[in-house]
């Protein structure tokens, strides 16, 4: 099996340490280079952190077949993580929220600025996220084709862990919208069946905030992973609340998220 590259933005805070722990858990299932990435504001600060990060990486014992490396770059987390991930050909970024020193707190809408800068998916971890094998994945979709772009990534995770996949959508009473939704669901079901996954398809009521219904469903099903595609239907994306509310969810569930605009060339 070829080795993947997972990037973990790291600044020696507890929440980025938790992201590293989650990356190490994933590395138990796939041969992976876990690259600790530290972004410094200047060359001087970067040189000061380089040895510290490299020495720290050497203290970590990853699962067999994987390794932990260190990379220090000059840059800004809001504008440069996506660029660096592309240059490094990373498959995944595992990011802790609310823990970047010297910059704005990486939380909610600020985290979305980072996520929308990258082509590869993120897994967003909170400081109190439980580190446990993934057993049930909740994949919320909607009427847009963009929402389906997470399907293959969620399938990769489910196949790694032998996890259940729960696809949920809001019920549609309008006949045309119902037909459109059924077409979307049939596409998703076929993609999962091609991966030898039999997805569980559920529908939630149309009324109320969708993010709250997703979280309620995940809690009721005892799911421990959410996967979604971020796509803004607003002319002002900063006012969108669905994705930020999920990545900062009160159950501290890890959330995989991809920016559908930059990923549009990959699927559909």
Image (cartoon, rainbow, N blue to C red):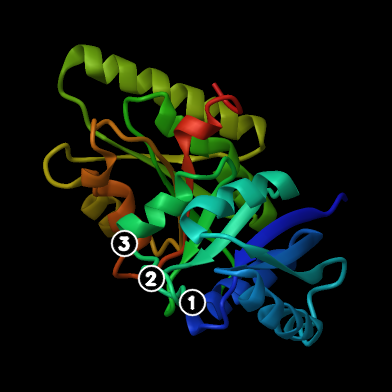
Which part of the image, by quadrant, shows the C terminus? top right
**Mark pair 3, 1: CA separation:** 17 Å
Q: Position of residue 91 (x, y in %)?
A: 68, 48
**Residue in front for this viewpoint, 162 or 266:** 266
Please report contact status of discs 2 and 3: CB closer than 8 Å, yes or no: no
Q: Earlier in the sequence, mark 2 or mark 3?
A: 3
**Mark pair 1, 2: CA separation:** 8 Å
Kindly identify the residue that appears in the image at 71 percent across and 46 percent down. 87
Q: Position of residue 245 (x, y in %)?
A: 28, 57
Query: Visible in this render: residue 254?
Result: yes
User: Toward which corner of the image does residue 183 lie, by quadrant?
Assistant: top left
Q: Position of residue 6 (x, y in %)?
A: 69, 58
Placement of 30 over or under 200, stated as above or below: below
SS at badge 2: loop
Q: Which residue is the extreme one toward the left?
A: 207
SS at badge 3: helix
> How many residues crowd mark 2 within 10 Å: few (<14), some (14–19), many (20+)?
some
Q: Earlier in the sequence, mark 1 or mark 2?
A: 1
**Residue in front for this viewpoint, 80 or 142:** 80
**Residue in front for this viewpoint, 10 or 77:** 77
Q: Earlier in the sequence, mark 3 or mark 1?
A: 1
The residue beneath circle 2 is 252
Please report contact status of discs 3 and 1: CB closer than 8 Å, yes or no: no
Q: Residue 220 got which mark?
A: 3
Kindly identify the residue that appears in the image at 26 percent across and 58 percent down. 216
The residue beneath circle 1 is 130
Q: Position of residue 266 (x, y in %)?
A: 61, 28
């Amino acid at each position: 099996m070829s080795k993947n590259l997972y990037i973990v933005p790291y600044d020696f805070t507890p929440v980025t340490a938790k992201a590293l722990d989650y990356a190490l858990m994933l590395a138990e299932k796939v041969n992976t280079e876990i690259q600790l990435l530290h972004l410094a504001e200047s060359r001087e600060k970067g040189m000061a952190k380089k040895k510290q990060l490299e020495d720290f990486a050497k203290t970590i014992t990853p699962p067999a077949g994987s390794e932990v490396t260190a990379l220090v770059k000059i840059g800004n987390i809001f504008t440069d993580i996506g660029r660096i991930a592309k240059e490094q050909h990373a498959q995944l970024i595992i990011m802790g929220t609310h823990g970047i020193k010297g910059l704005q707190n990486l939380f909610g809408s600020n985290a979305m600025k980072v996520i929308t800068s990258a082509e590869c998916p993120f897994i967003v971890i909170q400081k109190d996220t439980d580190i446990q094998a993934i057993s049930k994945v909740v994949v919320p979709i909607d009427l847009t084709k963009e929402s389906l772009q997470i399907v293959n990534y969620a399938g990769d995770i489910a196949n790694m862990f032998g996890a259940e996949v729960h696809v949920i959508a809001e019920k549609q009473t309008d006949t045309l919208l119902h037909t459109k939704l059924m077409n979307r669901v049939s596409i998703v079901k076929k993609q999962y069946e091609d991966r030898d996954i039999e997805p569980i398809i559920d529908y939630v009521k149309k009324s109320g905030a969708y993010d709250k219904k997703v979280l309620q469903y995940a809690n009721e099903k005892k799911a421990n992973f959410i996967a979604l595609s971020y796509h803004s239907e607003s002319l002002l994306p900063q006012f969108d609340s669905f994705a930020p509310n999920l990545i900062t969810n009160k159950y501290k569930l890890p959330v995989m998220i991809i920016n559908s605009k930059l990923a549009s060339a990959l699927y559909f």
